[in-house]
Image (cartoon, rainbow, N blue to C red):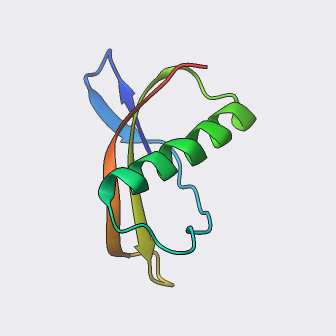
Amino acid sequence: MQMWTPLRGHLHPFTDIECDVPDPLPTQTLVWEQWAHDHLAAVAVHDRWQPGRYHFTAERRDRAGHAVEVFARGYWDWTP
C-alpha cells in the first residue's frame, strides 16, 4: 500500500498487508480488484485509517519478499 499525499502530490509507502488468497484463484482482474477493496476496507476500519486515496498492488511474493506475480493494482479511495 502507498498513500497519496495531496500537499506533496505523490505517493509514499504506507504498509504491507499479508492475507490468504481466495480459493479458487480469480481469473479476472476486476474480481481481484474487488477482493482487494474488500480486504483493504476491513483493515482500514480495524486500524482506523484516515480517509484518502491509496494505491494498492495485489501480488504473490517469494520468501525474500520480491513480487513473483501481480494480480491487480490500482487506486482505492477510502471514506469511512
On screen, residue 10 versus residue 62, left or right, reads left
For image coordinates 46% across by 75% down, the residue present is 65
Give above or below for 6 relative to 11.
above
On screen, residue 24 versus residue 53, left or right, reads right
Count numbered badges in the picture.
0
For image coordinates 74% across by 36% down, the residue present is 46
On screen, residue 11 versus residue 21, left or right, reads left
Where residue 7 sits: x, y (%)?
32, 15
Where residue 59 sits: x, y (%)?
40, 66
For image coordinates 42% across by 59% down, the residue present is 58
Where residue 77 sits: x, y (%)?
42, 26
Extreme residue in the right direction: 46
Give above or below for 55 relative to 5.
below
Residue 31, quarter of the rendered image: bottom left
The C terminus: image quadrant: top right
Camera-side residue of 5 and 62 = 62
Give above or below for 41 relative to 29.
above
Extreme residue in the left direction: 9
Camera-side residue of 52 and 80 = 80
On screen, residue 9 versus residue 80, left or right, reads left
Give above or below for 8 relative to 22.
above
Extreme residue in the bottom direction: 63
For image coordinates 58% across by 22% down, the residue present is 50
